[in-house]
Image: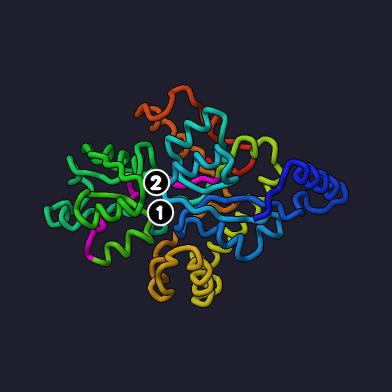
Amino acid sequence: MTTINRRKTLALMAGATAALAFGAPAIANNRKIRVGALRFTSHSASFIALERGYFAEAGLDVEFVFFQAAQPMAVAIASGDIDYAVTAVSGGLISLAQKGAIKVIGGALSEDSALDGQQILVSDAAFQAGITEPSKLGGKSFGITQSGSSFHYMGSQIAKAEGVELSFKPLQKVGAVIGALKSGQIDAWSIVPHIAKPLAGSGAVHIIGAVKDYVPNYQITTVFTSAKNAADEREMTQSFLSAFSKGVDDYAAAMIDRKDGDDGVNAMVDLIHKYVYVDRPREKAAPSIINGTMRLNSNAALNLASVQHQLDWFKSEDLVDSSIMIDDLVDQSYVDIIKG
């Protein structure tokens, strides 16, 4: 990896300024950036943008850094270890935003009433004991990665709607939650369909409901960066969002609209498989990748009402400081805002 020192950075900035003066792209210098991601199909827009050259066209030399949970990604943005990321709103992300370290700059994965979304799962033991619908979850354990994670938020919304109490069990990593659910150490969980459906198909767990029935129009993941990048690196940030949005459009065209039929779906599965279910042969990975098809927001538009609801919940649970406001978390100057 090439290290860019301060002198080189200043030279690159000067070159970018000169390019702008002559009408060339503002960021046309192969600027190296690190992008945080999970090995989920919901991160496909970033993978597509890299594989199809959209980041390169924007002058960005992208390296992925993979994580196993949302909150560590927020810490990595704040520390400068990565530049951009897509992940769920979490208590850690909100707290770092309040400290002036990070900003949400767009929306990514959303629940869509027309598509299968995140599923509510129970262990086989719980199912055999009669937990066959969310209303019967009272007193049961619900797996989460950390307190203040998106899993915590979803579980709380399900419990509130059904008028039941859940016992939340932090297990740090998605893999640990899966293991605990399959072995019956926890009773329930909610997760994206590309994980939920294969688990249910194995017989080890059962689907008993859908998150979209409890959290409609849920802005599941957001695009975010450091506050410094948002304020001082506007052209680079806009270039990132532009390339990312092209990846979103390609994903929707192939996997949701199926504009190129089965050939388009298969080509997209081949691309995504380079990053998701990489430990499985293509023929076994393909059904899970297809099952994971969900809505990614066009132009990285952000459902501000959903983010506000999440923020209000975190505050009500004393998981973040009560004084933080939506403008501390979101820089609305970058993206379209979904009003509903």
Task: Report the residue at 74% width, 41% height from top.
Answer: 6
**Contact between labelled residues 2 and 1, with CB atoms less than 8 Å apart:** yes
Position above or below: 299 against 323: below
**Type of amino acid at the residue the image marks with label 2:** Pro
Position above or below: 244 against 170: below
Give the image quarter of residue 78.
Answer: top right
| Residue 320 rendering spot, x and y as whole percentages | 42, 28
Left or right: 34 as drawn, with respect to 71: right
Magenta region includes residue 216 = yes
- Res 32 label: none
Q: Write down the region rendered in magenta.
A: 203-223
| Residue 295 rendering spot, x and y as whole percentages | 48, 56
**Separation (CA) of disc 1 from disc 2:** 7 Å
- Res 113 label: 1
| Residue 150 rendering spot, x and y as whole percentages | 39, 43
**Type of amino acid at the residue the image marks with label 1:** Ser
Residue under numbered circle 2? 216
Position above or below: 5 against 261: above
Check disc 1: other Cα within 10 Å, few if <14, some if 14-19, many if 20+: few
Looking at this rendering, what residue extends furthest in the right direction?
A: 22
